[in-house]
Every structure is written in C-alpha cells, then in structure tokens.
Amino acid sequence: MGAKPLPPGLVTGKTARLPPLTTTCTFAELAADHERSLTHGKDTRPIFTPEKRRKYRNVKVTIDGHLFDSKREAARYGELRLLERAGKIRNLIVHPWWQILPTLRIPGLRTMRSRKYTADFSYYDTGGTVEIVEDVKGRDATTDAAYRLRRHLFLSQHPEVDFREIH
C-alpha cells in the first residue's frame, strides 16, 4: 500500500501524519499534528494558536519584566519610572495587592477563598506620608460591576489611601 497524498498546500520534506480525510478538524489541530510529525513526537506544542479576542481589545505589554494589561498601563509605568528617577515619587510598586475579604470557612459545608484587590501602581510622593494607589482604566472598564465592587470594598477598608483612576 502506498502513502496517502498530502492535501494541496501542505508540502514538507517528511511525511506528515494527517487525520483521515473524512474527519473534520481545526487548523490548530492540523498544525499541531504537523509539528509533532516534524519533531518525531517530542514537541507537542502547536505552531499556531489563535488568541481569543480580549473584552476591551487591549494589548498586553512587558516592560522591565512586568506584564501590563494594556499599552496605556505600560505608558503610565514609564511616566512613573521617570518621576521616580527624578526624585518626585518614591517606593514605586507595580501590581500591589490587598486582601479585601478574608477566607470564609463554613463548618460542614465548604470554604470560600479570600478575595484581593490588585491595583496597577502604588507609590509615595517625596514629601508625603500618604500612599497613592493608581488604577489605569480604558474606555469602558470603569463600568464593570465587579471592578466597582472591588474598588468599593478596597476604599471602605483603606480610607487613608489616596486612590486615583487614570483614564
């Protein structure tokens, strides 16, 4: 018996293990199977994985080892780093978090894990003793009910903090 011919457009130097022609599969599955055949099954990662569209169409950015959720947040980080180098602010922290609800254990039923609020930045002005917490927001993000609830819980537990939303 001879080998089955490759579908048009898929030309390789080695024989690819393809699913039967009667089976339907996604492009990602076909690409992963093709990649495994080229590496003799050692690497199972697909060549191409389509990324899901984000809710607010943001683009993740990495700067100085920090992963930011948007270009706007990364730009704000750059501004704050310049202010820190100039001596205008001090103790810049990226993605600080605070516990807003403790772990809840209900005997005989279940345990609900604690909840936390993660801001984008926190820092102090050079002369001030008040901590400044910033959250960078895009167009529609502030209307999200879950965010408004987390912000409300955070501010009710930490009234000493100067909270700023950067739009």
Image (tube, helix red, strand yellow):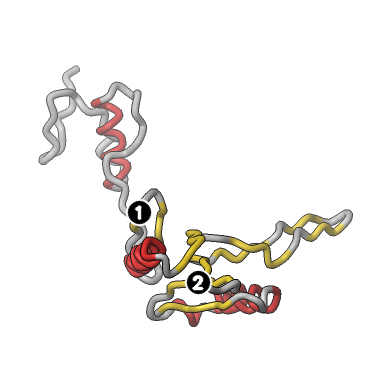
Answer with left or right where residue 139 lies relative to residue 160.
Answer: left
In the rendered image, the vertical position of residue 25 relative to residue 37, given as above or below: below
- Which of the two marks, 2 or 1, is nearer to us in this view? 2
Q: Which residue is mark 1?
A: 62
Front in this rendered view, residue 87 or 67: 87
Front in this rendered view, residue 24 or 135: 135
Q: What whole-number distance in Å separates the C-alpha atoms at marks 2 and 1?
A: 25 Å
Q: Residues within 10 Å of mark 1 (few under 14, many from 20)?
A: few
**Viewer can see residue 58:** no
Q: Residue at x 67, y 74 (%)?
A: 158
Q: Residue at x 41, y 53 (%)?
A: 66
Q: Which residue is mark 2?
A: 125
Q: Residue at x 36, y 51 (%)?
A: 64
Name the spot of residue 145 as percent of width and height, x first: 56, 79
Q: Name the quarter where the N terminus is drawn.
A: top left
Front in this rendered view, residue 121 or 90: 90
User: Which image quadrant for residue 157?
Assistant: bottom right
**Viewer can see residue 29:** yes
Q: How many marks?
A: 2
Answer with left or right where residue 157 lies relative to residue 24.
Answer: right
Q: Residue furthest bottom?
A: 143
In the rendered image, the vertical position of residue 121 relative to residue 45, given as above or below: below
Q: Amino acid at mark 2?
A: Asp
User: Which image quadrant for residue 78?
Assistant: bottom left
Q: Earlier in the sequence, mark 2 or mark 1?
A: 1
Q: Amino acid at mark 1?
A: Thr
| Residue 161, numbered label | none
Query: Please, what secondary structure does the residue beneath circle 1 have?
Result: strand
User: Which image quadrant for residue 150?
Assistant: bottom right
